[in-house]
Structure formats: C-alpha cells, structure tokens
Image: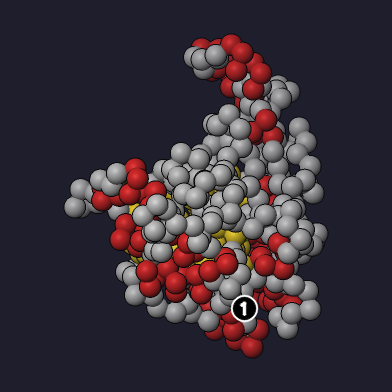
Amino acid sequence: MSDNPVSDNPVSNKDISRRRLLGTVGGAGATGLVLGAAGGAAAHAAAAGDAPTALTTLGSTGIGFHGTHQAGIATPLQACGHLIAFDLAPGAGRKEAAALMRRWSTLAGDLMAGRSAGDGDTGVALDAGPSSLTVTFGFGHTFFDRTGLTAQRPPELDPLPAFSSDQLDAKRSDGDLWVQIGADDALVAFHALRAIQKAAGDAARVRWQMNGFNRSPGATGKPMTARNLMGQIDGTGNPKPSEPDFDKRIFVPPGTKYEWLAGGSYAVVRRIRMLLDDWEKLSLKKQEQVIGRRKSDGAPLTGGSELTEPALDETGPDGKLVIPDNAHARISAPEQNGGAAMLRRPFSFHDGIAADGTPDAGLLFICWQADPLRGFVPVQRKLDRGDALSAFIRHEASGLFAVPGGPKKGEYVGQRLLES
C-alpha cells in the first residue's frame, strides 16, 4: 500500500496553469538541453498563456490529499523536506485551531494537486507540477490543553521518557502543531512551506523549523534504500507496505477509543547530529563493525544481500561474534526488541559549519508507529544503553505528535477531533 498514490484531485492542464514546464524529460535528456536563450523564450511563452508543455515524469507525479491515511507516511521518500512546528497564539483556542486546520487542509489539497496557493501566491513554484508533494499534519501534547480537549488526548501522546544520551534544545523540540512537507522538487517544497506559514496568520506562531533532503529519484541505476550522511544504507529493516501486518504496526486501527485518530499514526521526530569528523576517522572495517552491515551494499556482516536476515549468533574463527554485541544492527533488530517495529522515514540535514568548525549535519529522524510505547521507546532505550553508534551521534531535538487519519472529501484534517 501507499499513501493515496493516485490523486483524488487529478492534475489537469487548467490546474497546473501556473506551473508550466519548459520541456519534457525526453527532450532534455536526449539533447542535453541548456536553458539559455531558448529556455528563456520557452518560459516567456508559458507566461504569456500558451498551452503548457508536457510535465516531466518527476514533476507530474501527484499524491492525493484525501484518504484513509494522511499522505507522507507510507509515501516513498522524497528528495526535499521541511519540518515546521507551531504554537497556537496567546488567546487562540479550539475555534481558532479549527479554522486554521480548515485553511491548511484546503491549501494542502490545492498544492498537492498542482494548483496555486490562491490570492497572494508567491510564484515560487511556477512551471512545476506537483512533484510528489505531501503535506502532513500532527498535534502535540500541549495542543489538547490549548484547545480544551484533554479528554481526547491519548496516553500514547504522553511526553517521551528522558534518555541518557539526550542533549535536547527545548526551543527546537515539541510544539502544539506539526507539519511535515515533502516533495521531489526543492522549489515546490519551499513554496508549500511558505504558503503554510503565511496561512497560519494570527492563529499560530512558528516554534521551530528544519530543512532536509534525500537522494533525488532517478539518481541511481535502480531503486535503492537511501543512504545517510555517514554513507550507510539506512532503512533496510523497515516494515514493508506489502506485509500483512503493516497497517497494524503503523496505523491506529478503527474502533480505538479515540476515534478521531483512527487511520492515523504517531510520529516521533528527532534531530540527530552526526559527528562526521569523528566517524570519518574510522577505518571502513571499524565503521562496518559499529553498524553491523557492509557499507557497500548494506548486507549484514554475516553475508548475503541487504535483505538477508543477520545471523546474530554466528561467530568467526576467533570465536567472537561476527556482528559485535554492541552493533547498531543487532541492538535495533525487531527480534531483539520484542518485535517492536516503526517505519523510519527520515531526511538528512546540513545546516552549515558549527562554531567549532565541525559540520552541523545529520539526520532528521522521523518514525511512524501505531503506538510509540511499543515502537520507538523500547528500541531507543536499548540503543541508549549500549549502541556503538551512540559515540558518533547526538540527539539535539525531539517531538512526539499524534497524526490524525486522512480526511474524507469535504473534511479537514482533525475535524473529527475539533468538532467532537
């Protein structure tokens, strides 16, 4: 399964009149097109109102806003991402929150279908198609206090426990409202970010915002699991939508006491700084021992391919475990954690060079699960106690958000909560 893979708002020529492209993939790829004078002429023609040319494969991909689940959860990784958290403004409550979610939902539906942001559109995404844009909304623990809905707050949304390795910045953590934006084009993603921020109006104020990226679709010869900034393949053990228990592990089932959350999920968000200077001093062999997998192809050190199950009990000629007892792959394996599973869907980040001269870079870790107390928390507790990777990472920000199910047509996200 995937999140609404076929748009329920089909992208028509009229819909994308503000997003006309300069050519097709075939034309650009075959001729090595350089956008000089010819490119400028094509752009001028589009602006003048001529019929739009065909969208490229990447730009034409649209993901539906309505559905059982919100988009951006089981959607394939996108090339560009923005995470932004808001706090409701002083004096704002349930009424203002409902009006905000109605505005945001209408806006997200339009943007994901390739339409404009309406009056005052910045024009940032002119000429582009939807580019797999998704906009996903969640509610933090404090949102329920601010809106007088504490009776509707599930216990799974209680604050995460403290972990010994945490070095969290409170100003970049938590929040009343959380928005995840992803797209395969950076300008489309930024356009959505700007539109969402502007549409908040006087109802909510930005608490924190983070930017991320992944490898672009088509950059590899075949589809591959993403790599992180340490160069490691990251996400091999993810639950697969094709697995029969995928929905049970990732989404809150119907019939839950908190019916507004049925079809939804819980997102744990962590800004994890990678100490790349220290990591890159390690030999390749040592890096692989820290992770428990080969760097070249993600296969476990006990052999096979990326998808081969690690032989956790296998020993080498020296009698030692081939996959060390503190290797990240061993400690995080579901079979080592009572079957705990979460869908990891991260973005990498690089925010320049820190004051000490080291790269401020790492992972915007986002994981999805039906219950964080059975997903993220038990795994992180084990990692916190003895993961070899812990010496090379630093958890600097954190948040936990309840993400409602997808809206039906005519609904806005969170309507079943805010109008209950």
| Viewer-closest of 393 and 151 | 393
The residue under the point 52% across, 46% down is: 303
Task: Specify whether 135 is left or right of 276.
Answer: right
Location of residue 82 in the rendering, given as x and y in whole percent from the top left corner: 50, 52
Location of residue 367 in the rendering, given as x and y in whole percent from the top left corner: 55, 62
| Viewer-closest of 29 and 298 | 298
What type is the residue that disc 1 sits on? Answer: Arg
The residue under the point 40% across, 78% down is: 162
Residue 201 visible to the viewer: no
| Viewer-closest of 151 and 328 | 328
Residue 183 visible to the viewer: yes
Location of residue 212 in the rendering, given as x and y in whole percent from the top left corner: 46, 49
The residue under the point 46% across, 65% down is: 331
The residue under the point 59% across, 11% down is: 31
| Viewer-closest of 179 and 212 | 212
In this picture the colour scheme is secondary structure
